[in-house]
Amino acid sequence: MTDIVESAETSTLLDELTRMPGREDPYPRYHRLREISPLVRAEDGALVATRYADCAAITRDPRLGHMPSHMLDFVSPGWNDHPALRQLFTSILTINPPDHTRLRRLVSSSFTARRVQALRPTITQMVDDLLDEMSGETDFVTAFAFPLPVNVIGELLGIPPADRAQFQHLVRDWTQVLEQINPAVLETADPAAATIRAYLSDLAADRRSAPRDDLISALVLAEEDGEKLTEDELLTMAGLLFAAGFETTTNLLANSLVALLHNPDQLALLRDKPEIAREAVDELLRYDTPVQLLTRVAWEDVEIGGIAVSGGDRIVAYLGAGNRDPQRFPDPDRLDLTRPDNGPLSFGGGIHYCLGAPLARMEAEIAVPALVRRFPELRLAGDPVRRNSLTLRGYTSLPVNTGS
């Protein structure tokens, strides 16, 4: 057994990740943290893991879970009075078994592989339509990376096309609480979360009276072993699926394009061999993952990376760091779309493995090869603007020139 490291250097590295430019390029800091120790302690007491094997184990170990309500009351007093926190902390993203098991079973009965695969022709057409509208200098986030996934998840859920665009800023305001929780953040996050919930409440009421072939209707009707989603569970689930359905995929598409433009040999390879799309998306997910970290709590004494962890300790698994671990990925800072034995941590693992992973993968596998084929002269037209966030890593603006 070795000791948990807490030093001036680790504090400095972790502090830099909370600010720009540390968030612009966190990977050198991840490398240094990984060299220092399997686990380091942050100033707030949380333990930080940066090695692939440890991060993978953290996502799967049943002795590690999400923060129970009595701990939430201590860490975020009054959380239940804030719509933004209540809808996050009671969602399938952050609850534990047995409630998580029941909700996941009910949602999985509606959010099926068949329903996702049925969207493939629709996604292909959406991609073509958006590419048809791109010409000359444009912002890739505004023109493509946001409208594609928001329309895909909107189509899946049954949100009318005219209503979808309003949710970009609402979801971004709400998901600020994933990064930090303070009065200033809650001042914008709470009304955003309340607006989203009110909209979905009206939509669910409409589907109860007149069901359609969409996921909202399926969730309204979902039943297994005599159990159904309560109204509160339904609205919380629909809000999470909608927000996660486009926020992370928008980041995946933008991160992928920047990575390819900075590695023209790999961009040319994908253009010439679109059949490697699945392997390419795995590598793009690994290289600059849209979700950089997740948090767990030890429910009992455990061992991580040869270090004893006490029950009650909070643990942060830096998935983005694990995805650049040289012990798992040779030459990890190199983008290699044909990398063998890939296995990125980007969708988490265990019982909380991302429900929407197959949909996000399919969108990227269709969209990215089509984009680079359509615009062989595609290039940056200015400096991309990173969002000021580490947990959700992406861009707020990505100016490009299509060359057409």
Image (spheres, rainbow, N blue to C red):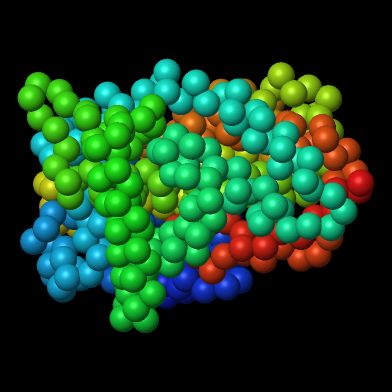
Q: With 383 as the anchor, is 391 left or right in this view?
A: left
Q: Which residue is located at x 17 percent, y 50 percent?
A: 232
Classify 237 as above or below 220: below
Q: Which residue is located at x 66 percent, y 56 percent?
A: 142
Q: With 114 as the anchor, is 107 left or right in this view?
A: left
Q: With 306 as the anchor, is 29 left or right in this view?
A: right
Classify 157 as above or below 93: above
Q: Nearer the viewer, residue 300 or 99?
A: 99
Q: Nearer the viewer, residue 191 or 19?
A: 191
Q: Find residue 251 and report its horizontal and vertical position in percent.
A: 57, 50
Q: Find residue 216 and report its horizontal and vertical position in percent.
A: 33, 37
Q: Find residue 78 and report its horizontal and vertical position in percent.
A: 15, 73
Q: From this viewpoint, which residue is outermost toward the bottom? A: 184
Q: Which residue is located at x 22 percent, y 30 percent?
A: 221
Total numbered badges shown on the rendered structure: 0
Q: Nearer the viewer, residue 330 or 255?
A: 255
Q: Is residue 83 visible?
A: yes
Q: With 171 as the anchor, is 190 left or right in this view?
A: left
Q: Which residue is located at x 33 percent, y 47 percent?
A: 203
Q: Find residue 333 and report its horizontal and vertical position in percent.
A: 65, 45
Quadrant position of residue 115: top left
